[in-house]
Amino acid sequence: MSLRALRSLKAIAHHGSFAKAGEAVGLTQSAISLQVRALEEEFGAQLFDRSRRLPVLTEAGRIVLARAEEVLALYDRIPEALSDERSLSGRLRVGAIQTALSGPMPGALMALRRAHPRLRVHVGAGMSAELAARVATGELDAAVTTEPVRPHPSDLVWTELYEDRFWLIAPPGLQGLDAAALLARMPFIRFDARAWAGRMIARELRRLGLKVQEEMVLDSQEVILKMVEWGLGVAVLPLPDAVLARASLTCLPFGDPQMRRHVVLLERQERPSGRLCAALAGAIRASMETQMREPVPEPVQVEGGRRPQAGRRRAEGS
């Protein structure tokens, strides 16, 4: 019996097919089938009902899967048990949203490398909902995401890292226009509603009764920023102050009051990588605090000197 075979069994149960499980763990479908066959021969029991179109766990398969999850959880805790108080060791598989990768993550990873040279952190990108699912299945040990918005996997816990504010962003030189005028004048570049932040933006636009001329739907905040910088439209995004400081854009607070989101570190409830994740969370917070000390642009002023508010409430009955 191999740990890799147990991970493959867990992936099949989650993804529902040998082919998708192979994609998740980096093996071919035939290699997955060989691993399952080896497990069945070792335990002397059929783990899947193959009479159906998609593989379904038998009663024996469910028992083996439950024990496999326990074995894998114990194995994943070994590096933590070998670590002393001064230096952590082992491997941490982490996913992160794009704004975290372009914000505090590089500084946090460098700090971890210096403090814990035996710790290996593998990093991947994705949207919050996708990363949460990968943490729930054990493909990732943790993920830096937006605070979960329902529906989300029920067996996750999270630790708050920092907060982003939402901004209506437009090309430079449009400081004299308010939110409604900008949205009426220019095409709207929507942040994909499959992302948790995208759902929050869509909900607030509806609540405030703001009409948009939608032309693009994108899932990368970095790409949306570039599109707006090129004058192709306006958008609403959650942005860290450090990113905002580097952008030469017209920026208006979005929401009434201005919307905020919490960026968190997601883990499974059993927390097999607890100390490693705690070290990562501390490094991200420290990196964000360093970036927050950088100068931030003054809020854009509209004619008359008043600070623009994106999307005031409509009068009752309008």
Image: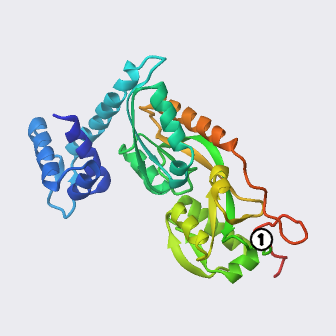
Say whether residue 87 is left or right of residue 285. left
From the viewer's perspective, is 70 left or right of 47? right
How many numbered discs? 1
**Split into 4 quadrants, where in the image is the N terminus?**
top left
Q: Return the residue found at the far right.
A: 304
Q: Residues within 10 Å of mark 1 (few under 14, many from 20)?
A: some
> Quadrant location of residue 19?
bottom left
Horizontal side of residue 278 vs 210, given as left or right: left
Nearer to the camera, 298 or 84: 298
Coordinates of residue 305 in the picture (x, y in percent): 89, 66
Q: Position of residue 41 (x, y in %)?
A: 8, 40
Q: Secondary structure at mark 1?
A: loop
Q: In the picture shown, does residue 161 fall above or below 194?
A: above
Residue 76 seen in render = yes
Q: Position of residue 204 (x, y in %)?
A: 68, 67
Residue at 58% over, 80% down:
214
Please indicate, yes or no, whether residue 46 appears anywhere in the rendered image.
no
Q: x, y percentage for residue 115?
A: 49, 25
The colouring scheme, among rainbow, by chain, secondary structure or one colour, is rainbow
Q: Residue at x 62, y 82 (%)?
A: 213
Residue matched to label 1: 175
Give the amino acid at mark 1. Answer: Gln
Report the front residue among 177 and 44.
Answer: 177
Name the residue located 60 percent from the left edge and 70 percent from the top edge: 228
User: Which residue is at a point 78% across and 73% down the rendered structure image?
Assistant: 178
Residue situated in front as seen by the camera: 117 or 125: 117
Is residue 68 shown left or right of residue 266?
left
User: Which quadrant is the C terminus positioned in?
Assistant: bottom right
Vertical comparison of 304 with 98: above or below: below
